[in-house]
Image: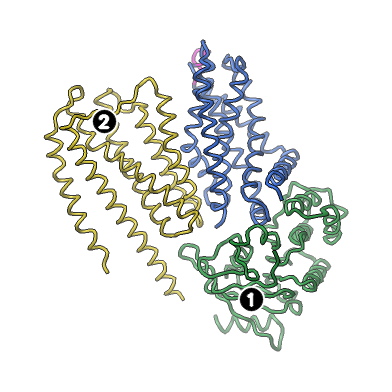
Chain colours: A green, B blue, C yellow
Amino acid sequence: MDFTSLTLTDVTRNFGRRRALFKVSLRCVAGEILALLGPNGAGKSTLLSIASTLLEPTAGEVRYGDQTARAAGAALRGRIGVLGHDLYIYPELSAVENLQFFGRVYGLPDVPARVEAALARAELAHRRDDPVAGYSRGMRQRLALERALLHDPRLVLLDEPFTGLDDAATSALRRRLAGLREVGTIVLITTHDLETIDGLVDRAVMLQNGRLVTIEPGPGSLRDRYRRLTTVSA
Amino acid sequence: MSFLRTVWLIVRKDFLIEARSREVLYTTLFFAVSCVLVFAFGFVREGRPLEDAASGILWIAIAFSGTLALGRAFERERQSETLRALLIAPIDRPALYVGKLVGVLLLLFVVELIIVPLVALMFQAPLFDHALLMMGLLVAGTIGFAAVGTLFAAMLVRARSRDVLLPVLLYPITIPVIIAGVRGTAALLEGDPNIAVARMWLSMLFFFDVVFVTLALWTFEPVMTE
Amino acid sequence: MDTRKLFILPLVAIAAMFAYAPYAIHAAPYESTMGLVQKIFYFHVPAAMAMFLSAFVCGIASAVFLFGRKEKADRLALSAAELTVLFGLIVLISGPLWARKAWGVWWQWDARLTSTLILWLVFQAYLLLRRYGGPGSDRLAAGVAIFGAANVPFVYWSVNVWRTLHPPTNVVRTLEPEMMWPFMWSAIAYLGLYGLMLAARYRLENRRAELEEIYLAAED
């Protein structure tokens, strides 16, 4: 299956008495990079979990194109790529083994070539057979990103992808994200690193206590606009 | 992508990880042997084991070390949330369950390969006189225990206090399996082995296995979605 | 409408049944071999009936919750699980009291008593999971309840075969007619009490959910 938009309509999620998301409505289309900002515990990870189909909203609806997650099932999951905070890679296995395993699990054609390309992009070709446990945080982050993108997903959900990356890797990731936009990917990215994504993202929204606030485009840096919003509402 | 291929991929991945660290195998094995020893102090009097002690000790060791292995096997998928990664992947979720189950079973069979001869040796138990029937009881009993255990351990990955909750949930539910295993083995160890009784318990175990595996396959998907 | 009023009539009826039960039990003839102690069955067996019924209610409600995603079914399952534990406790206390007189020991590994204990443990574990499992444990507990309820016949069967030395006695069917009607009286009173408590507990759980809603709405 394929889709060119992600639409959230009045999505609410409660954890017992705690409201993680409240009536969040959001639409992103293919070829768009959307930044999801906000303080810790504002509901960013919950929103990503819901978009990744792992978590069901308490109320409201999520549509991929015109399909819902429950109706589309496994075929839909095969079009989503997720980079979680916990990286989703096996530390006991090497980079090659991790990529091969997930490539096969996703049932991809031509796994060896994809793995080679991913290793080259992650700049890990020289450490390909070492167990991931011995990698630095930045190397793991790069590997985890390529793992998440191995199957050319239509929807990419990235939770803090810039964590632990040095300057070179950061600009490589910026280029990678811009490349994803070129091929019509929907990218949702959470970060605290506003300077890094300024100018890269098409739109930014902010979550505050589970509520969505749009950060209007305008003069000044993203950081300034973000700060203005947080101070006004606080 | 076919069901069996997914199962195979997951089993192979787990085997690769285990072959590299051997952590779960060694700790489980050592724990099982310790279990046998500790129980021996309770059930051996004046150098002679109590009647039926061997079969009880054998199955308790399997159940206890099985719980440990289940906990560790899923702790590994929790470390960097790879279980979530597998749940997002476009696979049949029941295939994920079967893959993990097969991995746990293979591990427990290896453990049994060591502790069954150990129990036979230490308690003068003729466990190999009816080797085929004994093997049937071990295989069927372990499948029944691990079928429930794998489901519970998988769902507890996202629960708090998961280490204590696993045995608390698992033991009451698997009591029929343990009873069948212990009594079936005891029937084989009697001075005059009671083959008919052992056969009856074996067929009961097969029945448990079918029901437990079916129920687990049926509930795995809804239990794993939050 | 205040749903509390709906409880008044059944409550009075069941209270009256319980009030009359001692007279009915007193009037019933003495069992020839066990004598007075047999009368505990008018108390013990209906409690066990309520317990097993409750276990199945919990299992079925859990399946509805898990597959139909109905929050209300989960509330019913929780209520039924608590009552399984409560009525199980009555069974597990009255059983040994009888065993002390009949067999001379407090605990006998009798098939019925042992399977009751195991079932009681399963639902106690269910409650522990809900209490200490953290967020999302309602779905996990539902899985446990399905296994717990499906397990009832296996537990009974295996424990029964395990205890073949003591042939099972079928208490209910061998009752004399004069004992039968006080027994039925007690059984209906007990099951009525169970139904009432389940309804009340379920209502409480629904009200709690409403309160949560109001609490969340007040935050907005």
Q: Magenta span covers which residues?
A: B43-49
Q: Position of residue B188 (x, y in %)?
A: 54, 17
Q: Please, which chain is the residue tagged with disc 1 on?
A: A
User: Is residue B48 shown in magenta?
Assistant: yes
Q: Which of C193 and A133 is in front in this view?
A: C193
Q: Is residue B34 left or right of residue A187?
A: left
Q: Is mark 2 on a helix, strand or loop?
A: loop
Residue occupying the point 35% across, 27% down: C110
Q: Is mark 1 on a helix, strand or loop?
A: strand
Where's the N terminus of chain A, which quadrant? Answer: bottom right
Q: Which of A150 and A196 is in front in this view?
A: A150
Q: Distance between the residues labelled 1 and 2?
A: 67 Å
Question: Can residue A36 be seen in the rendering of this structure?
Answer: yes
Q: Where is residue C178 in the image (x, y as percent from the top left)?
A: 15, 32
The answer to whether mark 1 and mark 2 are in CB contact below 8 A is: no
Q: Position of residue C118 (x, y in %)?
A: 41, 36
Q: Single out the residue that lies furthest toward the right.
A: A126
Q: Single out the residue that lies furthest toward the bottom.
A: A219
User: Is residue B225 shown in magenta?
Assistant: no
Q: Single out the residue that lies furthest toward the top.
A: B192
Res. A27 mark: 1
